[in-house]
Image (cartoon, rainbow, N blue to C red):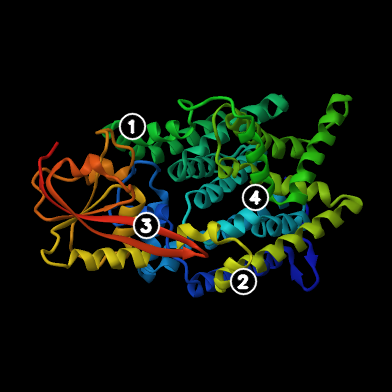
Amino acid sequence: MSGRPNSVIGFLSAWQLAVLAGGLLTLARIIILIQANYELAPDEAQYWDWSRNFAFGYFSKPPMIAWLIGLTTGICGDAEACIRVSSPLLHFATSLLIFALARDLYDAKVGVLAAFVFITLPGVSFSSGLASTDVPLLFFWCGALFAFNRFLETGKTSWGAAFGIALGLGILSKYAMAYFLLCAMVYFLLAPQQRKKLSAKGSLVAAGVALLLCAPNIIWNMRNGFVTFGHTAANAGLDAELFNPGSVVDFLVDQVGLFGPILFFCLLWGALSLFRLRKAGGQVDRRSLFLLSFSFPILIFVLVLSFISRANANWAATAYIAACIFVTAWLTQGRRIRALYASFALHLALVIGLSALVLAPVLIERVGLDNAFKRVRGWNLMASEVLDLAQLEPKAQSILADDRSILTELLYYGRDTDLPLFIWDYNGRPQNHYELTVTLPKDAKDPILLVARNDDPQAILRAFKSHEFVKLVTVPTGGNRTRRVFVYRLEGYDGD
């Protein structure tokens, strides 16, 4: 730790400034969540449904996101804002942890600026309005990084235990937390003298605590055929077409969007400068090695994965915790700080623009971004029309969906109905949580209302003695875009 005092900026201490700036932005984000009129995306609706049934694991994700939603909805109800409110709050908490870590490594000024860098990142502004597994992952990743640094500097077992807690809870948020161990190995390779700081007792305590926290999820997976681990591995797409140079370009463009163009360029520039210094025999300080070790291995790993198969933009999100501090510390040297201020101005403009789009949907069409918002529009109207059709004589006894997105939105926006909802499993191999838990039973009562995204669901229709087309439900999703579902009435399920 640097041991430098918590300097005062104006009449506020650095800590107070970090809390005030981050708190005001977070409050604004929560107000926007409450005022905004956009609906849950299918994944969010799924997480909400999971939250109603406490478990130590779910088909595609560890349980943390469901636990968080269960906590917030237990306090303020099932409205969309209540489902999403943990995201801006956790991002705020993450910014304060970044402040603490940056202050330990450098000083209070770098801490304040790094905290503000993080909370204004484009990716953070976007994810603050969604219920996402990445949000708790980033919080626990930052907590683990803070505790790990303290553990190395002090050797105290208590900090080893804190590191283990953060590591375990991070794994319960998203399995990408495992990148942390890869980064730690890289750090010890680059700075072998740091390995000597590891306390054997503290390391064992950290490992034991992390394993203890993860044990219930491991047991859940064992009892369910390791479905979450299998789904996570399948997400890498290694069984699809390999070697896609175009995916590399897409991934890099996405990273520029998540971190911001100025900061991403400065991150690469700063890292390259230190690489050249080290190659020339110069001394690179421990702090830079520490931060780069917990950012670039992730970026490189996911970049390679994007070339081999595919990679989503958010798969490298954990790299930007350490990157925020590194690029802030590097830019505060000399005249480079102007680039930092330019980045703040750009990102605040993006915050204002995104807020305007969310609060005034008419602007979305005017700027041609209706496609970006289609996943959070039209679901409530679709569910309402489907439930109305279910009440037509003869009344449906259950609703069957052929698609996970359709089912999860019906579960949320049709949550007041007492009709059972099921999903059709086309191949007999569960591909999602609902194909594992709520497939149509053989004794399902007639009639059944089928809601199909597939415009020719013959595989389903052939499994019934009779079927009748009811209606094509078409709902607007913004601009000239619509969402269509095909509704049938089915009778006589043969159970095959």
Residue identified by numbered label 2: 356
Q: Nearer the viewer, residue 150 or 70?
A: 70
Query: First in sequence: mark 4 or mark 2?
Result: 4
Residue identified by numbered label 1: 226
- Image quarter where the N terminus lies is top right
Q: CA distance from mark 3 to mark 4?
A: 32 Å
Residue beneath the point at 47% across and 71% down: 37
Relative placement, left or right, of 192 versus 142 is right
Indicate the amino acid at tag 3.
Answer: Arg
Crowd band around label 2 with a 10 angstrom C-alpha radius: few (<14), some (14–19), many (20+)? some
Indicate the amino acid at tag 1.
Answer: Phe
Q: Quadrant of residue 388?
A: bottom left
Q: Position of residue 169 (x, y in %)?
A: 46, 45
Residue depth check, mark 1 versus mark 3: number of the one nearer the observer: 3
Instruction: Decide: is 259 above or below 416.
Output: above
Mark 3 touching mark 4, by CB under 8 A? Answer: no
Instruction: Decide: is 248 above or below 366.
Output: above
Residue depth check, mark 4 versus mark 1: number of the one nearer the observer: 4
Query: First in sequence: mark 3 or mark 4?
Result: 4
Q: Secondary structure at mark 4?
A: helix
Query: First in sequence: mark 4 or mark 1?
Result: 1
Mark 2 touching mark 3, by CB under 8 A? Answer: no
Residue identified by numbered label 3: 484
Q: Nearer the viewer, residue 192 or 31?
A: 31
Query: First in sequence: mark 1 or mark 3?
Result: 1
Residue identified by numbered label 4: 258
Residue beneath the point at 59% across and 32% down: 306
Q: Secondary structure at mark 1?
A: loop
Q: Secondary structure at mark 3?
A: strand
User: Can residue 106 be seen by looking at this rendering?
Assistant: no
